[in-house]
Image (cartoon, helix red, strand yellow):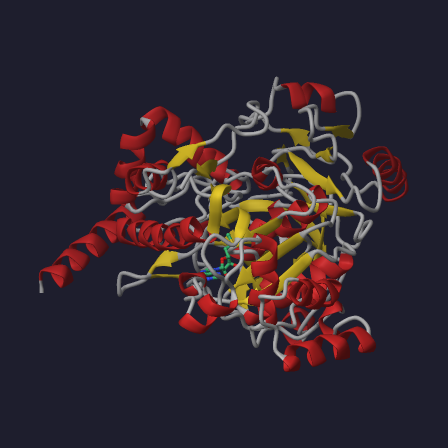
Amino acid sequence: MKKARDLHLLLKTIRRSSTTTTPKMDPSDRYCFSPILRWNPEVENYFIKAYGADHFSIISKALTRPSSYSCVRVNTLKSTSDAVIEKLLEIIKEKGFDGDCHGKEGSGPNENVGSPLEESLKNGPIVKCQIPGLEYVLFVKGSGPHMIDYGYVPGAPPKEVIVSRKCAEAVLRGAQVFVPGVMACSAHVEKGDTVAVSAATEQCNPNGGWAIGITRGTVLQGLQTDPYYFERNGLYIGQGTATMSRAGLFRASKGIAVDMNNRVFRLPSFYDVLEGEIFLQNLPSIVTAHALDPQKGERILDMCAAPGGKTTAIAILMKDEGELVALDRSHNKVQDIQKLAAEMSLTCITTYKLDVLKAIRQRNEADDINTNQSSNSLRFHEEKASSSTAEGFNLDKTCEDNVSNAIENGGTYVSKADIRKAKRRMRNGPGRNQCIGGRVENSKGFYPDSFDRVLLDAPCSALGLRPRLFVGEVTIDSLKKHATYQRRMFDQAVKLVRPGGVIVYSTCTINPGENEALVRYALDTYKFLSLASQVSSSFLPLTTNFTSQA
Ligand SMILES: C[S@@+](CC[C@H](N)C(=O)[O-])C[C@H]1O[C@@H](n2cnc3c(N)ncnc32)[C@H](O)[C@@H]1O
């Protein structure tokens, strides 16, 4: 009962705050980009306590903007940074994919102004990361915020397209407006018309929840009587050319709807660019893989791996030698990891579908009799061979060793069926999972102490991912739930890493409850864990390294 009342009070508070924060402005001033994130008041207070009001206000504003550069990781197994720079410069020359400047630079704060990166990007559109060991990371210059003249004339507002919030966030990162993202459009828009594009963000509905209140297909007049007219003040993300008529926009099922040629933020699009040679990835994610410091020949676990950004970064750092087990609980997402690994020609990655909360495989008595052995690597092989899930993404690579190791070792039992299976696999060549769209295998889990290094890139509240135009759905309760879940996952990581091994824990959120508090929990709960220094002290990621001395 009490819970229900608390919830009611909380929702009331949200509703009140949402109406008071809607800014009213002159019609000509609304065509700009100056979003204000609306937080649940309790969450806002919590962050203000954690960061201080001024710092949190800077964070909150920065969250609404994309980074002013794109970060690209070079697949050093296929190319070099210099070769990629040369190719990208050629593409920029041909296609101008960093965007021409149509508008004036805005005066809004830019987090990189005056930074060493900003300075070096003045000398050219692409620079190599200066941090030792990270020379395979390239920064490609973007720009913004730009002020755009939408051509507002009193009484004759510009033609408009409203896109969903998710579509708008993608556009701010450099994407085009695709058909499914279009929510509403002015009457009489024809192919080739210039349109002002704005974002529909979630609004508080009468039940206290949040929803995008605009019905798909709504006709806009550009007048104050339009639905969510005031709510879209300051949410204009640029101008583009409609690629089809209004009717076409709502009839088509896919394709580009608006070619965004005059953007508030101009970031290069890497769609279809140097596939397999480069990977677009945020710097902290690259640093996370680096902090794990993976070594050739090791056995490494990536617990929450999909879509595989960090998995592939780790595989490249291992020089594709050793075994990298990549887990995710979602079947489709495991396929994404497989696709990415295949695209980057990485073979040391073995993928499984597994809920990592059930990642520990219990050793039964039969196992104990059969695995009376000291060699860790042999134990790993045996664990795989005895598993019904033995056909991982790259299992074939090691199956010959599995069988011969086991036989040489005398005392280790490998069933005839396993040997037959392994031979069949050797005869038939690469497993069917070594191709795009391969089968996703379930796993029974792994024995304790199985891995040299473990990455736990935990699901989190993602309050560090930007740009974000809406955070109203985040509650104290949802933040707490993330923290509880992460602790349970961490407990599994501790069991799976071998004594002396390394765990890297990372999130993409600013919530101290999911970051610093987890570190506190880890050190208080597992006295044999200690914080390890990272490979480079110049990093400032949301990652924490632990070593296990148990
Ligand atoms: C932050 S994302 C991982 C991103 C990934 N490491 C990368 O860099 O590309 C978190 C992932 O954890 C997965 N996940 C959530 N709960 C899980 C569980 N209990 N077991 C396994 N995976 C889980 C989600 O499906 C999601 O793909």
Return the residue nearer the eye: 101 or 431: 431
The answer, for residue 56, to whether it is visible in the render is yes
| 372 with respect to 173 (left or right) | left
Residue drawn at point x = 51 percent, y = 46 percent: 235
Count the numbered circles shown.
0
* Residue ID at (47%, 60%): 447
Above or below 398: residue 201: above
Q: Quadrant of residue 522?
A: top left
Which sits in the foreground, 203 or 50? 50
Image location of residue 486, percent across then percent down? 38, 51
Q: Horizontal and vertical percent for residue 275?
A: 80, 53
Judge left or right: residue 359 versus residue 168. Answer: left
Percent of width and height locating residue 71: 68, 38
Quadrant of the drawing holding the N terminus: bottom left
Task: Work out whether residue 245 can be spotted.
Answer: no
Q: Position of residue 72 (x, y in %)?
A: 71, 40
Give the residue drawn at x 72%, y 45%. Answer: 316
Seen in the image, is 27 located left or right of residue 525?
right
Residue 524 location, quadrant: top left
Q: List the single residue furthest toward the left.
A: 1
Q: Is residue 529 above or below residue 462?
A: above
Looking at the rendered image, the quarter that the C terminus falls into is: top left
Would residue 253 be found to the left or right of residue 166 on screen? right
